[in-house]
Amino acid sequence: NAGVTQTPKFRILKIGQSMTLQCAQDMNHNYMYWYRQDPGMGLKLIYYSVGAGITDKGEVPNGYNVSRSTTEDFPLRLELAAPSQTSVYFCASSYLSGGLTFGQGTRLTVV
Amino acid sequence: GQQVMQIPQYQHVQEGEDFTTYCNSSTTLSNIQWYKQRPGGHPVFLIQLVKSGEVKKQKRLTFQFGEAKKNSSLHITATQTTDVGTYFCARGDTGFQKLVFGTGTRLLVSP
C-alpha cells in the first residue's frame, strides 16, 4: 500500500515555464488536496476535490490549475512559473472528513 | 475560511520537560485536527477532535477541545528528542472538510 505518491520530488523551473506535479493515491479516498508550504510557514490550500470530476479553489489558487479525471489521480498544473511559486507542494487525500494522508512533497524552485 | 492562530510560534525545552501548544479561533470550530511535521518531512495526522470539551490521549500526548469549541491544545508530557518537529492544528469547516491549517508551533528538544 503506497499511500499518496508525488512526483517529482525536486524540480527547478525557469520563469515562464510550465509543469505538472503528479499525485496518486491508492487508498480509494474520495477527497484530495493540494497544499503549498513556504519555508518556515504553515500550509496553504491551493485546490481540493471531493471526487472525480469535481474540483474547487482553496485559499491560494492563482497561477495553478487542477483536474480530477479519476479517483486515484489529482495532478496540479503550474502555468507560467513565477519566483513566488517557489515552495514545497504537498498532495494529500482523506476518506470523507477524516485525517489527511500526505505525500512526501515536491520541492519546486523557480529561477 | 477563518484563520487559526497557534501559540507559541517556537519553544525550546530540555528533554523531560513538558510542552503545550495552543490553537485559537475567533469563530466556533466544527472540528479540529492535529498534525506533526518533522524537519524536512511531511505532515502526519495525529488526531481529530469533534465534541465540545473532548479530551483524547495518545501515550504522552494529551489533546483537548475547548468547551466553546473555539480553542484546542496539545500537551506533551516529559518530552523526548523524538518529539522534535512542528505541530499544526487544522480547522475543518462545517460540511466539507476543507482544512485550514494553523501557523504551527516549532518544538526543539535538547538532550
Image (cartoon, rainbow, N blue to C red):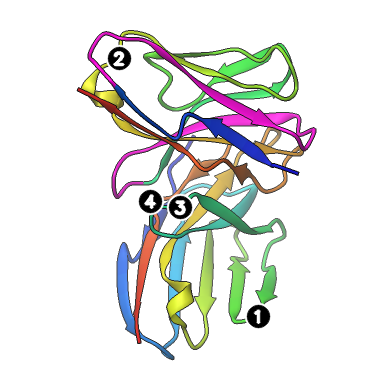
Closer to the chain start, of discs 3 and 4, is 3
Which one is nearer the viewer's eye here, A27 or B100?
A: A27
Region rendered in magenta = A13-41
- Mark 4 and mark 2, same subunit? no
**Residue named by callout 4:** B103
Q: Which mark is residue A81?
A: 2
**Residue named by callout 1:** B59
Which one is nearer the viewer's eye here, A75 or A34?
A: A75
Disc 4 from disc 1: Cα separation: 25 Å
Q: Chain of mark 1?
A: B
In magenta stretch: residue A24: yes
Disc 1 from disc 2: Cα separation: 45 Å
Q: Secondary structure at mark 4?
A: loop
Spot occupied by residue B56 in the image (x, y as percentages of width and height): 69, 72
Spot occupied by residue B40 in the image (x, y as percentages of width and height): 39, 53
For image coordinates 44% across by 69% down, the residue present is: B21
Q: Chain of mark 2?
A: A
**Residue named by callout 3:** B41
Q: Are marks 4 and 2 in contact (CB under 8 Å)?
A: no
Up-down relation of residue A67 to residue B30 (above or below): above
